[in-house]
Image (tube, rainbow, N blue to C red):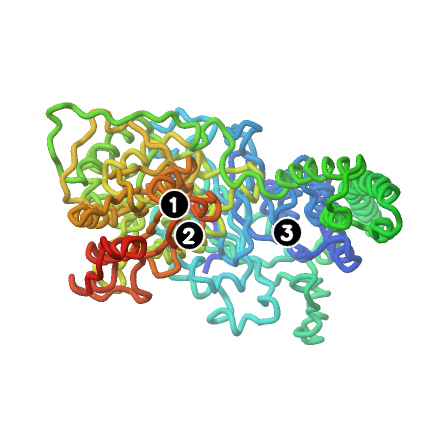
């Protein structure tokens, strides 16, 4: 196994100067004191929760010295020292995040939306456009789920490979300099037990990308020691199969270094990063004998599960204690010099903590004083019997109010004076309206893009058809759409299982790898989670990926990373980052338990922040792709699986026409009942509508087209206003997407006002459909069931005209 002593891959690093050594020592102690102070702030009630990077200071300082402009980080919540060292975090910002300061200037990583230790750099300007990322030090936005940073890390590194190997991308200088950028990943030893970690490492080894993965090994995962976590209790030992056989051979380079050995750490990271950067060889650095002085977090004490011997060992092997001894032994500094540095570091942290708290709390105190003034006025006008004065006294006595306390008090006060008319009440209402708008921006904004490239800003271009346009297979419409867009924009590429050589299992990419090359249309292994992650990371770096999930059922492998990472990326950075990834998949009406293809309820509940397109045919799908390629927001497009061989006409502007999202399409006009559906169910409902017309029932069929966003123009309610009845139907489970559609229409659009009959839902059975055409028929809604359901609705209204059938 290569180690820092035995690996001689590159020349030794230059010796650091005394000033550089002492600068690292100072920063290490500032970070340590920040961790210690942060824990105290939580216990004092000034913060809700704390998780800190104490014990990891030296490895992170060494890593920072190898990190260059243009590089990227995908890490986890203990990397505060690293972020301080690269200049992308200040101590005041560190405490601002601990206090959940909602000002993006004070807390630029998440604007108080993520708990402390979740780091990010703002890669977008105020207009939502990418900055020059080739000249900045970049950190993708952290997430809490263990190993959740790994799929995205693959994509961040993969982008460097594309920028280096694809000449068409050389023009995009704000994103890369010849692919010289390294993607640095960090993770705790226990989290390497997650499947995403192994999947990501395997993918990186196959792809041969510049991914430098650091494992901080402190022997524990909260209270669970390594013997329960890792075979052989060593991640580097069990990953030796990844070790490449020699220079130029595929695989990883693996280093093992102790977390308290400062010169070895610096040397290791310099060697590893240079190898990664120049040769695009992925590297794993296993940093062992790391300590965690304060335990896992403020939720508990590590004295409960660590032995006395272990606690003594951790004190002796504290990396800052070891660095101090090394500096003195090597003659770089005296003990008095180092004690002075430690003392100054403590004072710096104390001052910045105080400043951060004042910056956070003073505006709230000012708002509290405003509210007290308004409430006092209300109490005077309403009299002592109103009870308002008690609310005033309670708020005044609260030493550390939050904004929720102010709004809560105002709402309760307004209850007490309901029905009264007074100037004080109006003033309080005006204050509340303004506060609600400000708090909506603080806590609810930027779920989606607010840039000029937001979905709603993309020009709608109608499809044009030549009079002699031939009828072709639906897949050929998609193929022509992708062909045109790949020619138009060299940033677009597609990855997924079987998309390359055979052109995907349904042939929509047929011939495109041969035409555009393997870098643009690329086969992957069977690894849905990192196929999506590869797309997220590449999209963060300015590319326009399509990550294909072969069948909708397989989205479950990737749903966690879609939900926890992609869906809330803009939200958790308050518009600081974006990743306009398109996830292409297919579903509906395929037979069999594991290819039933309509788990829409699960998707809807998990991906708010990602658009969900459910086209009924391939021309509609092409229109959505054209829109999404021009927008800067992520989306999932579910193509109808049984439509690839159905005949459609190719638009003459197949790569240019666009469809708006959130605008349903009325497929058939009617006057008696509105039927709302999407995807493959459209043809079934249209068939049923034709049969219903034969018995005198006029059905209006509405295809929602997209479930997220949903009917922004209230077209469905307009239809219900005409018909007074509505049926929602799809292939999901009962209470799934049909219930979602009903809620959107009846609740959000207030369509209940126009109903003469109870709204109805027709969904699939609660189980997955069995194999075979009979299994499909008896498990999912069919034309006869749609007919019977609509007929019964009409029979309730007019039983004489529509007598019982059965």
Question: Comparing marks 3 and 1, which lies closer to the viewer?
Answer: 1
The residue wearing badge 3 is 115
| Labels 3 and 1: the sequence-earlier one | 3
**Residue 257, x across and y down, in percent:** 56, 57
**Residue 763, x across and y down, in percent:** 31, 58
The residue wearing badge 2 is 740
Q: Nearer the viewer, residue 319 or 599?
A: 599
Label ID, residue 59: none
Q: Nearer the viewer, residue 157 or 145?
A: 145
Whether residue 627 can be seen here: yes
| Labels 2 and 1: the sequence-earlier one | 1
Q: Residue at x 82, y 47 (%)?
A: 350
Q: Is residue 244 above or below residue 19?
A: below
- Callouts 2 and 1 close, C-beta under 8 Å: yes
Question: Comparing marks 2 and 1, which lies closer to the viewer?
Answer: 2
Whole-angstrom CA distance, mark 3 to mark 2, is 31 Å
Q: In the figure, is residue 199 to the left or right of 101? A: left
Q: Residue at x 81, y 49 (%)?
A: 346
Q: Is residue 4 above or below residue 279?
A: below
Whole-angstrom CA distance, mark 3 to mark 1, is 31 Å
Q: Nearer the viewer, residue 389 or 281?
A: 389
Q: Residue at x 28, y 31 (%)?
A: 486
- Callouts 3 and 1 close, C-beta under 8 Å: no
Whether residue 399 can be seen here: no
């Amino acid at each position: 196994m290569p180690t820092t002593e035995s690996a001689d891959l590159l020349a030794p690093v230059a010796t650091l100067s005394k000033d550089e050594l002492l600068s690292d020592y100072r920063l290490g102690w500032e970070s340590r004191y920040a961790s210690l102070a942060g824990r105290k702030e939580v216990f004092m009630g000034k913060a809700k929760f704390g998780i800190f990077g104490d014990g990891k200071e030296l490895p992170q300082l060494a890593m920072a010295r190898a990190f260059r402009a243009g590089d990227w980080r995908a890490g986890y919540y203990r990397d505060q020292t690293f972020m301080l060292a690269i200049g992308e975090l200040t101590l005041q910002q560190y405490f601002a995040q601990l206090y959940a300061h909602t000002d993006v200037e004070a807390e630029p990583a998440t604007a108080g939306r993520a708990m402390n230790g979740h780091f990010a750099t703002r890669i977008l300007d105020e207009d939502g456009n990418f900055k020059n990322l080739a000249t900045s030090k970049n950190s993708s936005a952290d997430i809490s789920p263990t190993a959740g940073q790994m799929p995205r890390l693959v994509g961040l590194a993969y982008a460097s490979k594309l920028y280096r190997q694809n000449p068409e991308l050389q023009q995009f200088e704000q994103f890369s300099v010849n692919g010289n950028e390294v993607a640095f990943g960090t993770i705790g030893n226990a989290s390497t037990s997650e499947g995403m970690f192994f999947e990501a490492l395997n993918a990186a080894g196959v792809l041969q990308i510049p991914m430098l993965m650091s494992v901080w090994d402190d022997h524990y995962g909260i209270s669970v020691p390594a013997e329960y976590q890792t075979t052989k209790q060593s991640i580097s030992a069990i990953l030796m199969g990844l070790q490449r056989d020699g220079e130029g051979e595929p695989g990883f380079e693996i280093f093992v270094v102790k977390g308290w050995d400062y010169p070895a750490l610096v040397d290791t990271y310099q060697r590893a990063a240079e190898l990664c950067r120049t040769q695009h060889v992925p590297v794993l650095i296993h940093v062992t004998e790391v300590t965690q002085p304060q335990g896992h977090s403020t939720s508990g004490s590590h004295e409960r599960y660590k032995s006395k011997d272990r606690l003594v060992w951790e004190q002796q092997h504290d990396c800052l204690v070891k660095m101090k001894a090394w500096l003195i032994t090597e003659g770089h500094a005296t003990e008095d010099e180092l004690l002075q540095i430690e003392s100054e570091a403590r004072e710096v942290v104390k001052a910045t903590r105080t400043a951060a708290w004042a910056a956070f709390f003073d505006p709230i105190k000012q708002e509290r004083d405003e509210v007290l003034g308004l409430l006092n006025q209300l109490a005077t006008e309403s009299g002592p019997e109103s009870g308002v004065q008690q609310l005033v006294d309670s708020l005044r006595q609260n030493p550390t109010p939050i904004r929720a306390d102010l709004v809560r008090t105002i709402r309760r006060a307004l209850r007490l004076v309901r029905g009264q008319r007074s100037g004080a009440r109006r003033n309080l209402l005006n204050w509340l309206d303004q506060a609600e708008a400000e708090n909506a921006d603080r806590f609810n904004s930027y779920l989606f893009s607010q840039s000029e490239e937001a979905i709603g800003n993309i020009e709608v271009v109608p499809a044009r058809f030549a009079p002699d346009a031939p009828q072709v297979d639906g897949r050929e419409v998609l193929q022509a759409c992708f062909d045109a867009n790949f020619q138009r924009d060299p940033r677009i590429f597609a990855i997924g299982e079987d998309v390359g050589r055979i052109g995907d299992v349904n042939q929509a990419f047929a011939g495109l790898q041969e035409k555009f090359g393997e870098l643009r249309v690329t086969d992957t292994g069977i690894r849905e989670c990192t196929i999506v992650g590869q797309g997220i990371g590449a999209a963060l770096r300015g590319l326009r990926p399509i990550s294909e999930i072969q069948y909708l059922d397989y989205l479950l492998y990737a749903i966690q990373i879609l939900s926890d990472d992609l869906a809330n990326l803009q939200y958790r950075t308050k518009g600081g980052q974006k990743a306009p990834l398109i996830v292409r998949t297919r579903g509906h009406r395929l037979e069999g338990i594991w290819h039933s293809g309509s788990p829409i309820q699960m998707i809807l509940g998990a991906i708010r922040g990602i658009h969900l397109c459910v086209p009924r045919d391939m021309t509609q799908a092409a229109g959505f792709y054209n829109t999404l390629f021009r927008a800067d927001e992520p989306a999932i497009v579910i193509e109808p699986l049984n439509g690839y061989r159905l005949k459609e006409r190719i638009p003459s502007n197949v790569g240019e026409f666009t469809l708006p999202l959130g605008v349903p399409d009325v497929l058939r006009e009617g006057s008696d009942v509105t039927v709302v559906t999407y995807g493959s169910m459209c043809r079934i409902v249209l068939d049923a509508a034709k049969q219903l017309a034969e018995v005198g029932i006029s059905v209006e069929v509405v295809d929602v087209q997209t479930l997220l966003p949903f009917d922004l123009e209230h077209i469905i309610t307009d239809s219900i206003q005409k018909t007074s009845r509505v049926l929602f139907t799809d292939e999901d489970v009962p209470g799934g997407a049909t219930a979602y559609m009903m809620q959107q229409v009846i609740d959000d659009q207030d369509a209940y006002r126009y109903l003469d009959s109870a709204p109805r839902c027709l969904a699939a059975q609660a189980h997955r459909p069995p194999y075979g055409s009979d299994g499909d028929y008896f498990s999912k809604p069919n034309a006869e069931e749609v007919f019977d359901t609509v007929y019964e609705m009409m029979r309730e209204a007019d039983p004489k005209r529509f007598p019982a059938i059965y």
